[in-house]
């Protein structure tokens, strides 16, 4: 029985973190690995993609060998306080009080620390119990918030050296830096802003948080359907007026979009020094789990 | 269908001008990443082109947009944006920086400099001012209050900070007021008072233990800093309260209107409806809906005629083209039609959801529905955003039937 692996998915808002998280879950669960998907955004779209009404604070099955859970800062903080204060009545009074909220707001990173210690509880169950999952996929917060979350063990752990929180932050810090157990996937789409953001985020994660990185992920890439020479052909057909102009327009759109995307993919490669993994665009009005097989197949290539 | 149409007006840039008539403050709302900043900038430009004297408050713009608007590094200062000669009005842009502004506000409201310095340097204040949920939003609103009372502008367009919950935005004044008025701060001297008189000594002991554990963990002298902050703040509170009340009044003034910005992504409708529902419960209605980043085929080449949704009738082959090439064209058209169809469904869901909201509230005026095309590359230069403003378009109510998936199944 080996340790589970922690796969962290991050990137700028809207680039497809949740979709990629679901696709990874699809790939690993079908490969026979028990997988837990953890969504940190609230309200998030993972439930929607997985076709379940909502995600709960406890892991629930959403498919064969596939579970999902919502990791919410407030709820994590609540269960952290409950672990410090064994009496329910007391911990509830504390959580309900304005004073506590002010105190909590004054302690930077306390909510993040609580989230990580909850995550650790899924990675390393207490006592001799075996971990329930082989893979845990974290749909991490968008760029601006993921580095603070992942560096919490460093910023807060330095001071929180005592007590249960200190211990779990130390353990979490070991996890986050261990290339044998953890991998972070930074997702971009082939557009200038997303590429720039992804390169920046990777640098922060590598140099400051020091989490092992997977190759850059380029999501929602249009397929290549034409050769460069086809453009001229299409233009001359348009001029001749022999073909339905809407078809020509559609073809030209693909051709040019593909060309534009290629330049951004090249930039992603240049800026990160690594060959990006391209995930295909899903042309379905309804991007949901069972339509994600092509995406799952593409990312399976780089899954630990 | 006709009942639906009666609740909904469609329009274009001209309709937007008319809708903005008499409006002093336009707040752009919506979940993160949908294009609020871009849309706010382009509406501001459209209004300025049409003759309004506009100020746009920009929050967290993409680096290139910041350059494009030529925004000064110094947040909070107005900057004249150069517009094309045909502009009949003017545009000033201002960048929000919540952190610096909060300090400035405390300095402005504090009765003495000493007191202001003490508050601003308090370690707990340093953490709370940035971390307190809604403080960005509160500062945006503070700034709007100043801009709205400045006679140099007759329209203030407000971009809002990323927020997944509407409460984070609109609760800010109330929250800060509640905080200042609540007895919570008094409790800080003796946190165990939270528990009231009836609770046992053991309970108090446990609670003090938790507070001490927090202090040990953070290295802050949490309790002492908090209670000195509380007593310092007490002197600033009355003036803070006046501002917060003025902001609340401005938010509900008849000359303040709200536009919901949204993107037609798959799964997008649910977030947006949840967000709008929260806004609605706060008594705020989005009278305009702007669907941003709609796939529109004339995008890559302005000279190409806009596509109609039906992608090529029956078969694969077209005269004059090799079969393989022809097939690929049909495939492309079908794929693009699928994207459009997905976008149409999201907009339809939104319409239904918003209509349901209105129905629940009783008779309300129809909303203005507008769309903006997805541009490639993204509009981050002044000419591109000006161009985007010119493309504000009506959303057709009656849509063609879904495109036949020619060539897909065969
Ligand atoms: N490979 C893809 N092909 C087509 N659409 C995609 C793809 N990946 C994501 N999307 C769509 O893009 C939008 C944003 O994706 P999402 O996973 O919610 O992003 P994030 O979690 O980063 O905010 C969603 O509407 C989603 O359906
Ligand atoms: N109509 C559009 N076409 C293409 N890209 C757009 C459009 N509107 C916004 N974008 C791009 O999408 C990203 C998010 O837009 P932004 O306005 O910053 O959103 P928000 O303020 O809601 O977070 C930016 O990179 C922006 O350039
Ligand atoms: Mg997400
Ligand atoms: Mg923005």
Image (tube, rainbow, N blue to C red):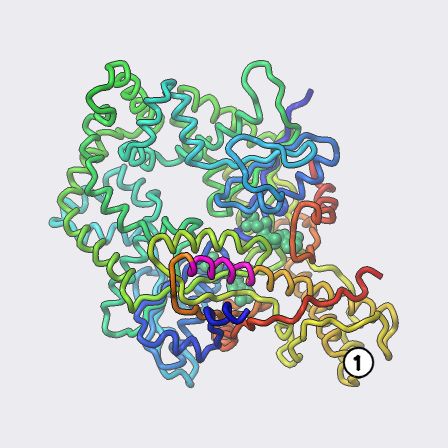
Q: How would you classify the magenta stretch by its main secondary structure?
A: helix
* Relative height, residue B203 to residue A152 (above, below): above
* Relative height, residue A247 to residue A136 (above, below): below
Q: Is residue B253 left or right of residue A188?
A: left
Mark 1 packing: few (<14 Cα in 10 Å), some, or many (20+)?
some
Instruction: Give me the residue at 78% from left, 69% from top.
Output: B329
Q: Is residue B80 left or right of residue A281?
A: left
* Kind of element beneath mark 1: helix
Q: Nearer the viewer, residue B106 or A179?
A: B106
Q: Chain of mark 1?
A: A
Q: Which residue is mark 1?
A: A237
Residue B109 magenta-highlighted:
no
Report the magenta residues as a range.
B348-359
Q: Nearer the viewer, residue B160 or A82?
A: A82
Residue B318 location in percent, x, y?
A: 84, 76
Instruction: Give me the residue at 51% from left, 76% from top.
Output: B387
Quarter containing the N terminus of chain B: bottom right
Quarter containing the C terminus of chain B: bottom right
Residue B377 location in percent, x, y?
A: 58, 67
Does residue B79 appear anywhere in the picture?
no
Q: Residue A285 sits in which quadrant?
A: bottom right
Q: Is residue A19 left or right of residue B151?
A: right
């Amino acid at each position: 029985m080996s340790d589970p692996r922690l796969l962290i998915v991050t990137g700028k808002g809207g680039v497809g973190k949740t979709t990629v998280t679901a696709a990874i879950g699809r790939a690993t669960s079908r490969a026979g690995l028990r997988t837990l998907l953890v969504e940190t955004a609230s309200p998030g779209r993972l439930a929607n993609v997985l076709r379940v009404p909502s995600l709960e604070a406890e892991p629930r099955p959403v498919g064969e060998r596939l579970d999902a859970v919502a990791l919410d800062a407030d709820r994590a903080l609540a269960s952290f306080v409950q672990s410090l204060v064994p009496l329910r009545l007391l911990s509830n009074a504390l959580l309900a009080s304005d004073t506590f909220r002010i105190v909590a707001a004054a302690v930077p990173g306390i909510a993040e620390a609580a989230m990580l210690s909850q995550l650790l509880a899924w990675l390393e169950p207490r006592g001799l119990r075996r971990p329930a999952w082989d893979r845990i996929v974290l749909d991490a917060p968008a760029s601006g918030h993921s580095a603070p979350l992942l560096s919490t063990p460093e910023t807060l752990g330095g001071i929180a050296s005592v007590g249960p929180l200190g211990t779990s932050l130390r353990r979490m810090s070991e996890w986050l830096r261990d290339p044998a157990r953890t991998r972070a996937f930074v997702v971009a789409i082939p557009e200038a802003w997303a590429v720039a953001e992804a390169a920046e985020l990777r640098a922060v994660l590598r140099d400051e948080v020091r989490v092992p990185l997977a190759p850059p992920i380029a999501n929602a890439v249009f397929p290549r359907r034409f050769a460069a020479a086809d453009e001229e052909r299409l233009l001359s057909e348009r001029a001749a007026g022999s073909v339905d102009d809407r078809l020509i327009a559609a073809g030209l759109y693909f051709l040019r979009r593909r060309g534009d995307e290629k330049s951004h993919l090249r930039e992603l490669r240049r800026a990160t020094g690594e060959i990006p993994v391209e995930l295909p665009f899903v042309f379905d009005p309804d991007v949901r789990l069972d339509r994600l097989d092509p995406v799952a197949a593409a990312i399976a290539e780089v899954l630990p | 269908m006709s009942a639906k149409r009666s609740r909904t007006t469609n329009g274009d840039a001209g309709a937007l001008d008319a809708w903005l008539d008499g409006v002093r403050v336009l707040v752009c709302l919506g979940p993160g990443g949908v294009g609020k900043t871009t849309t706010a900038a382009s509406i501001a430009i459209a209004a300025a082109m049409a003759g309004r004297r506009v100020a746009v408050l920009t929050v967290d713009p993409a680096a290139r947009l910041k350059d494009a608007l030529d925004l000064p590094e110094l947040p909070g200062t107005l900057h004249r944006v150069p517009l094309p000669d045909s502009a009949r009005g003017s545009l000033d842009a201002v960048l929000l920086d919540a952190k610096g502004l909060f300090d400035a506000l405390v300095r402005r409201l504090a009765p003495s400099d000493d007191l202001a310095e003490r508050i601003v340097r308090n370690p707990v204040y340093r953490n709370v001012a940035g971390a307190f949920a809604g403080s960005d939003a509160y500062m945006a609103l503070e700034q709007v209050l100043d801009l709205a009372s400045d006679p140099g502008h007759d329209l203030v367009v407000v971009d809002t900070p990323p927020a997944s919950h509407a409460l984070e935005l609109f609760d800010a004044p109330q929250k800060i007021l509640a905080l200042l008025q609540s007895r919570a701060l008094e409790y800080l001297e003796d946190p165990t008072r939270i528990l009231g008189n009836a609770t046992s000594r053991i309970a108090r002991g446990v609670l003090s233990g938790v507070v001490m554990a927090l202090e040990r963990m953070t290295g802050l002298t949490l309790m002492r800093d908090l209670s000195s902050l509380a007593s310092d703040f007490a002197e600033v509170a009355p003036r803070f309260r006046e501002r917060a009340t003025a902001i609340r009044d401005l938010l509900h003034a008849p000359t303040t209107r709200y536009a919901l910005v949204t993107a037609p992504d798959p799964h997008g409708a649910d977030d947006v409806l949840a967000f709008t529902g929260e806004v609605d419960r706060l008594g705020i209605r989005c009278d305009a809906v702007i669907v941003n980043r709609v796939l529109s085929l004339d995008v890559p080449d302005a000279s190409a005629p806009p596509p109609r949704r039906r992608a090529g009738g029956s078969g694969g082959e077209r005269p004059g083209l090799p079969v393989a090439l022809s097939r690929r064209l049909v495939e492309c058209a079908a794929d693009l039609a699928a994207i459009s169809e997905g976008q149409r469904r999201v907009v339809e869901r939104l319409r239904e959801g918003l209509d349901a909201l209105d129905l629940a509230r009783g008779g309300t005026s129809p909303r203005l529905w507008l769309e903006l095309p997805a541009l490639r590359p993204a509009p981050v230069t002044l000419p591109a955003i000006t161009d985007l403003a010119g493309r504000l378009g009506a959303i057709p109510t009656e849509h063609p039937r879904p495109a036949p998936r020619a060539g897909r199944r065969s």
